[in-house]
Every structure is written in structure tokens, then in C-alpha cells.
Image (cartoon, helix red, strand yellow):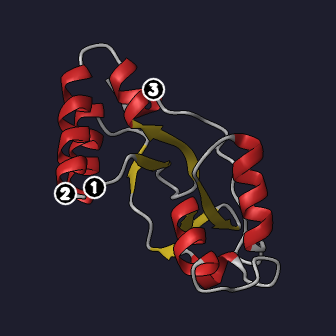
Amino acid sequence: MKVSEIMTRHVECINLDTSVKDAAEKMKSLDIGFLPICENDRLTGTITDRDITIRVVADGLNPRSVKARDVMTPNAFYCLEDQDIEEVGRRMQETEVKRMLILNRDHKLVGVVSLGDLSRASGVQQLAGETLKQISEAA
């Protein structure tokens, strides 16, 4: 089964110049903990609720003036939409991430797959459990 069959499409992105405050508000309204950062449909990084907490709030910075580019994680991990689910699950284990961004062959962001998506996919529930175990043990 290909990851494109189980991924969530229409992923919300922000751009490099989005303020951390606006990023946090978007996370809150969408009830999510991370956002991809894109420029011209190209993935440039990610920002998580943890990035905001550790790199902005804990350092006493102003979330209205700090930009996503200042606290993002560059070089985000990703897989391609035509890869097998098992391959994506193994990559999630190797990189210790709970969500994997999915790009097309033109390297444009087309989706995201989570551990929850893996756990609901027919035939790969064990892979989801193994992936979660590996990520949890590494933390």
C-alpha cells in the first residue's frame, strides 16, 4: 500500500516570515502541534509547539516579533507519496518522528502521515506499534 492512500492531504503551511504568535494561533485553531513552513510550495522546515516553548517562551522572547524562520527546524524529514507505507514507517523510526511530511516527485508538499494514520491502515498496525515504541525509547 502506498502512503498516498492513507496520508492527510491539504496540509496547512505557514511562511518563513509568519510570526510565532500567528503560528501558535494557527496550531490552536487547527488543534495540531506542528506546522510545515513553505515558500513557493517548497518545504523549508517545520515549527512545533515544543520549538515555540523552548526557543521563544523559555527565552523570554516576544512571539509577536520572532519569525518562524528564527526558531524553525530546517531540513525537515520527508518521504515521497509513491513510497510504501512500510518504508515510511521505517523512516519514521529512523528519524524518531511521529509525523512524516509527504512530497510529490516535484518536491511539493502534498500531505502528512502520522502514527495514527499508520495505526488505522489495514495490515500495518504492528508497524505503527513498533514505530511508537522505538520513538518512545529514544526520548
Q: Is residue 97 left or right of residue 93?
A: right
Image point (64%, 44%), residue name: 11
User: Comparing marks 2 and 1, which lies closer to the viewer?
Assistant: 2
- The alpha-carbon separation of the residues under discs 2 and 1 comes to 7 Å
User: Disc 3 or disc 2, which is closer to the eye?
Assistant: 2
Image quadrant where residue 95 sits: bottom left
Q: Which residue is mark 1?
A: 96
Q: Is residue 20 above or below residue 67?
A: above
Marking on residue 30: none
Q: Could you tell me if residue 124 is visible in this image?
A: no
Q: Quadrant of the C terminus?
A: bottom left
Q: Which residue is mark 3?
A: 6
The disc, 3 or 2, on the residue closer to the chain's N-terminal end is: 3
Q: Nearer the viewer's eye, disc 3 or disc 1?
A: 1
Q: Which of the pair 125/3 is nearer the observer? A: 125
Q: Is residue 87 above or below residue 135?
A: above
Q: Identify the mark nearer the N-term, 3 or 1.
A: 3
